[in-house]
Amino acid sequence: MKKSFAVLLLAFFALPAWAQEKVKIGVVDIQRIISESQAGKVAKERFRTHVKKVETELIREKQEVERLKSDFEKKSPLMKEEDRRSLEKEIQKRERGYVLSARDSQEELRQKEGEMTGEIFKDIVKVVNEVGKGDKFSIIVERSQVPYSDEGIDITKKVIDLYNSRVPAPGKVTKGK
C-alpha cells in the first residue's frame, strides 16, 4: 500500500514535467479479472474439484477415527488393560495423523490456489501492459491500492475482454496445436 501511494505521489510531483503531455490514468481490478475471466473461472472450478477431493479424503479419515473411538468405548470394559492401552494409543496416533493431514491439506490448498492465481496474474499483467501501451496510458494502478477512483478510468472490462480473446482458458486446447 505504501509503495503504491509513493508511486502516485511521485507521479503527481512529477506532473509539471508531464504538463506538456496529457496524463492518462487507468484503474484495473485484478481480482475481478481473475474471477470473471474464462481462465479464472476454469481455474476456480479446478480448484473447487481439488478441494472436494481433499475434503472427501479428510472426512473418510475422520470417520475412521470416530469409528475406532466408538468401538473402543463399547469394547473397553471387556478388554484386558494392556489391550485397552494399546488401542488407546492407536486411536491417539490416528487422531494426530488426522489433525496433521488436515493442516497439511490446508497448506497445500493455499499453495495450489496461489500457483493457479499466479499463472493467471502473469498473463493479466501482459494484457494490462498491452492496453496501457496501446491506449497511451501514463499509469495504470490496481483498484485495491487506490482509495478512490472515478468509474470512467476503470479499464477492467476492457482487460477482461482482451484477456479472454487472447489467452486460452487453462485446460482448453487452442486450434492448430
Image (spheres, helix red, strand yellow):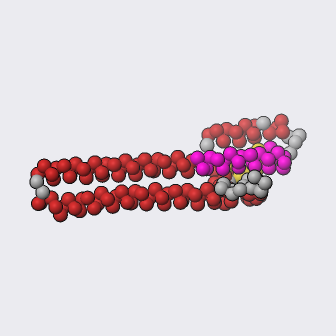
> Image quadrant for the N terminus?
top right
Instruction: Report if residue 36 lies within the magenta region.
Output: no
Pick whichever, 148 or 72, lies toward us: 72
The answer to which quarter of the image holds residue 78 is bottom left
Q: Residue furthest right?
A: 20
So how many labels did they put on this image?
Answer: 0
Residue drawn at x 66%, y 54% is: 170
Residue 39 appears at what percent x and percent y?
67, 56
Residue 110 appears at what percent x and percent y?
51, 49
Residue 33 appears at what percent x and percent y?
68, 56
Pick whichever, 33 or 152, lies toward us: 33
Looking at the image, can residue 46 be seen?
yes
Pick whichever, 101 or 113, lies toward us: 101
Residue drawn at x 44%, y 50% is: 105
Residue drawn at x 15%, y 58% is: 76
Q: Residue furthest front?
A: 177
Find the magenta span and give its range. Answer: 115-138
Looking at the image, can residue 154 be seen?
no
Pick whichever, 43 or 139, lies toward us: 43
Q: Main secondary structure of the magenta part?
A: helix
Instruction: Report if residue 122 lies within the magenta region.
Output: yes
**In the figure, is residue 17 to the left or right of 75?**
right
Residue drawn at x 75%, y 37% is: 13
